[in-house]
Amino acid sequence: MNVLAGVLGSALAALAGASTLTVHAQAYPARPVNLVVTVPAGGSLDATARLIAAELSPALGQPVLVVNRPGAGGNLAGEAVARAAPDGHTLMICSSATLTINPHVYKSLPFDPVKSFDPIIMPARLNLILAVHPRHAVANVQEFVSLLRAQPDKLSFGSSGNGSNPQLAGVLFGAQTGTRALHVPYSGIAPAPAGCGSRCAGAGRDRRQRGDRRAGLRRTPARSCR
């Protein structure tokens, strides 16, 4: 993480110097830096942001403040960052869905996913897991598929929001297995397990669920759920 903080600090300084048009060069950062997160507190993306902020603060010599701005699949956070002064003091950490999927599922966006932001670094890769409540009494993916096929549209699955990677993973799972389930969107992946309770299967980040929910195998090209 110290190496990541150094890379981020150098990149941010370069971006700030290139985008700040002043007669006299200014030291960066000149004040605390806001790191805007597109999801609520909790969950892997928020945890990643807080780890980065903890290491980046001493590297930059200024506090790096984590600001959670959930909603609209990351569009609210994206709009706030896009409208902020382009001086490197407002950053955003988001999932790939905010910039790559949202343009295809929303009629319009309050920002341009290509022109509104300068990419800095991809700090993490997060896998998805399938977690099922034990009340459903399934021991593997094949048994879960059989359960879904026997009860079309009766079971539901929670995700981190409309257009999110977990939702699209759930849709892909249904298309590949010939099953149908009701999608329940949440404002982030952290509220999904508690909100679903015993009603849902969950398509979530690779962070093992508490209790005895059964964590499914990660999908790979070599494994079929049919």
Image (cartoon, rainbow, N blue to C red):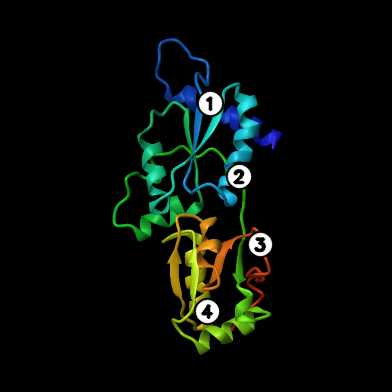
Q: CA distance from mark 4 to mark 1?
A: 45 Å
Instruction: Name which residue type carries label 1.
Output: Ala
Nearer-N-terminus badge (1/3): 1
Residue corresponding to mark 2: 48
Q: Which sits earlier in the primary sequence, circle 1 or circle 2?
A: 1
| Percent of width and height locating residue 217 | 67, 71
Q: What is the CA distance from the residue labelled 3 to the residue labelled 4?
A: 28 Å
- Residue type at mark 2? Thr
Looking at the image, is mark 3 or mark 2 earlier in the sequence?
Answer: 2
Disc 1/disc 2 C-alpha distance (Å) = 23 Å
Q: Which residue is label 3 attached to?
A: 210
Q: Callout 3: 10 Å neighbours few (<14), some, many (20+)?
A: few
Residue 176's label in the rendered image is 4
Q: Nearer the viewer, residue 220 or 180?
A: 180
Residue where numbered disc 1 is placed:
14
Mark 2: secondary structure: helix
Disc 4 versus disc 2: nearer the observer = 2
Q: Position of residue 119 (x, y in %)?
A: 50, 40
Q: In the structure shown, which secondary structural element does the residue marked by tag 3 occupy? A: loop
Q: Position of residue 100 (x, y in %)?
A: 44, 54
